[in-house]
Amino acid sequence: MELLSSRERKFIEDRLRSQYDIEDFENLILIKAGRGRIRATTEETLRLASRLKGVQQIGLYVMKISDGSLALSVEGSQLLNKKIRKNIVEVDEDLAIEWMKASPIKLDEKVGGRYVVARCGELYLGSGRVSRDGKIYPQIAKWRRIPES
């Protein structure tokens, strides 16, 4: 468990601002979780975990750094829901199901970033990578995908 340095945190805050127009990442402690993954926790949880033996991980997986861009997890997008003001793609219920199957989504609208966040009403579904062919590839972990029928 390794906390982000102030330089790494500033990089993430700058990326959140430029990609998603998020101004405040609350008072969460950010932790490196391996392979570019970032977890978030509170100061109280960090203090408690430091006193306990055998704690392997703490916090919630909120994002992954990939080629200098941030892909928010489902939980990360839900945690930051009202703060995300840019690169949001609205999907209906049918497209939300396809998103959760990790099926590529073709949208008519043009999106500005490399990653976008899908939203179905008030439910945030995590990030998807925008390809050059205009399709969005949802970044949904295999264990949480809706199986193909």
Image (cartoon, helix red, strand yellow):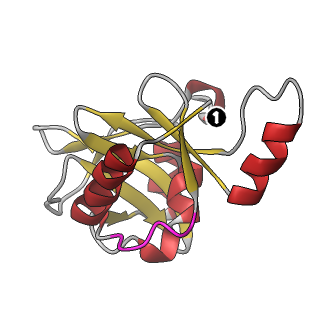
Q: Vertical placement of 105 versus 113: above or below? A: above
Kind of residue sitting beneath label 1 = Arg
Q: Vertical placement of 59 versus 42: above or below? A: above
Asked whether, in this view, residue 132 is left or right of residue 80, the answer is: left
Report the label total: 1
Name the chief secondary structure element in magenta: loop
Span highlighted in magenta in the image? 22-27
Q: Measuring from the top left, give residue 30's x and y in whole percent.
A: 53, 48
Q: Which of the two residues, 27 or 140, is positioned nearer the viewer here?
A: 27
**Residue at image location 13% in from the left, 60% down from the top:** 110
Q: Measuring from the top left, give residue 48's x and y in whole percent.
A: 84, 47
Q: Which of the two residues, 41 or 94, is positioned nearer the viewer here?
A: 41
Q: Is residue 25 shown in magenta?
A: yes
Q: Vertical placement of 34 versus 64: above or below? A: above
Q: Measuring from the top left, give residue 43's x and y in whole percent.
A: 69, 57
Looking at the rendering, which quadrant does residue 92 occupy? bottom left
Residues packed near mark 1 inside 10 Å, few (<14), some (14 to 19) or many (20 plus) = few
Q: Which of the two residues, 145 or 113, is positioned nearer the viewer here?
A: 113
Residue found at the very far right of the displayed protein? 52
Task: Identify the residue position indicated by label 1 in the image.
Answer: 144
Q: Vertical placement of 73 versus 28: above or below? A: above
**Residue at image location 62% in from the left, 30% down from the top:** 1
Quarter occupied by the C terminus: top right
Q: What secondary structure is marked by label 1?
A: helix
Asked whether, in this view, residue 11 is left or right of residue 147, the answer is: left
Asked whether, in this view, residue 108 is left or right of residue 32, the answer is: left
**Residue at image location 10% in from the left, 38% down from the top:** 132
Q: Is residue 80 shown in magenta?
A: no
